[in-house]
Image (cartoon, rainbow, N blue to C red):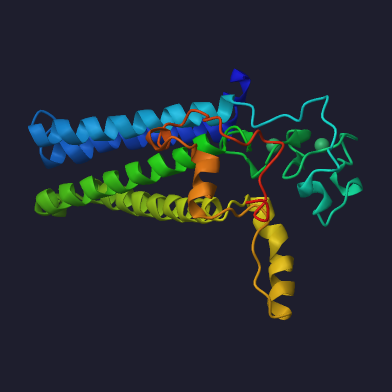
Amino acid sequence: MSCRRFFSIPVLSVILVMGLVYYVTLFVFIDDWVGLRSSAGKLNALIFTSLASLCIFSLSICVLLDPGRVPSSYAPDVENSSWSGSNNGTEARKCDTCFAYKPLRTHHCRVCRRCVLKMDHHCVWINNCVGYANYKAFFLLVFYATVACIHSTVLLVCCVFKNGESYAGNVPLKTFMVSCGVFMIGLSITLGTLLGWHIYLIAHNMTTIEHYNSKRALWLARKSGQSYRHQFDLGVYKNITSVLGSNIIKWLCPTFTRNTEDGINFSASRDS
Ligand SMILES: [Zn+2]
Ligand SMILES: [Zn+2]
């Protein structure tokens, strides 16, 4: 774990935006709508505080947790069906920069300057790679942030509907509320799109890198009239459990859930 990763402008910006959204939601949207001391105000404040806490918790895990390091003792098992079935061959799975063997789904990150297990992408907003160990926390960060943004937007709309007439003569307040509305709707759409994209990837057991790498295979399969199925696609339920864990109760808990896969060996669709 490295706390130094927090000290980057994008990570600090994310924390600042979270803090601003939290403050405005509680002390402007909810307070101006029903008042923070009313039961409806207390309930909404409690829900929003829970969502904000889960966002901060998920963000901390994303930033602090190592996404997955290739063990120094790692050597490929060439008898393994995943290897023998790979189009890349054994040579292709050696990292050109680290000069070490890398397991299937592992990629070299030029920013982190090392190989990362089941690498999805390098994310500047968490100043870390998104990989095998922190992908669940990253997905839940996007999930909770999307839900929190939509909740905040709904509260903003409720506030405007109740106090719309009083804002009419107050240009600075009206401008502030319109700016908040544009920002919150834009953020909700951006995060919602990102969430939808990662739900799609999880449902197909793909990483972002694998999705882009599979485009050519998909094109070739379609050209020859065949259907294409991703190598690690085990069916929607198994794909979900491989990321969120086999215990459904822990699906929404951002802590890493160890499952049958170890980040090095993965079940391929033809093995199931
Ligand atoms: Zn490498
Ligand atoms: Zn990286």
Q: Does residue 166 appear in this view?
A: no
Residue beneath the point at 71% across and 73% down: 221
Q: How far across and how far down the image is residue 152, in percent? A: 28, 44
| Residue 158 drawn above or below residue 32 | below
Residue beneath the point at 21% across and 32% down: 45
**Nearest the camera: 91 or 56?**
91
Q: Does residue 114 appear in this view?
A: yes
Q: Is residue 158 left or right of residue 104?
A: left
| Residue 192 drawn above or below residue 247 | below
Q: Is residue 213 left or right of residue 19?
A: right
Q: How far across and how far down the image is residue 14, in percent? A: 48, 35
* Viewport quadrant of the N terminus: top right
Image label count: 0
| Residue 265 drawn above or below residue 186 | above
Q: Is residue 29 left or right of residue 60?
A: left
**Nearest the camera: 50 or 266?**
266
Q: How far across and how far down the image is residue 22, in percent? A: 32, 33
Residue beneath the point at 46% across and 43% down: 142
Q: Is residue 46 left or right of residue 91?
A: left
User: In the figure, residue 213 lies in which quadrant?
Assistant: bottom right
Quadrant for ligand 2 reads top right
Q: How far across and how far down the image is residue 102, in percent? A: 81, 38
User: In the figure, residue 266 lies in which quadrant?
Assistant: top right
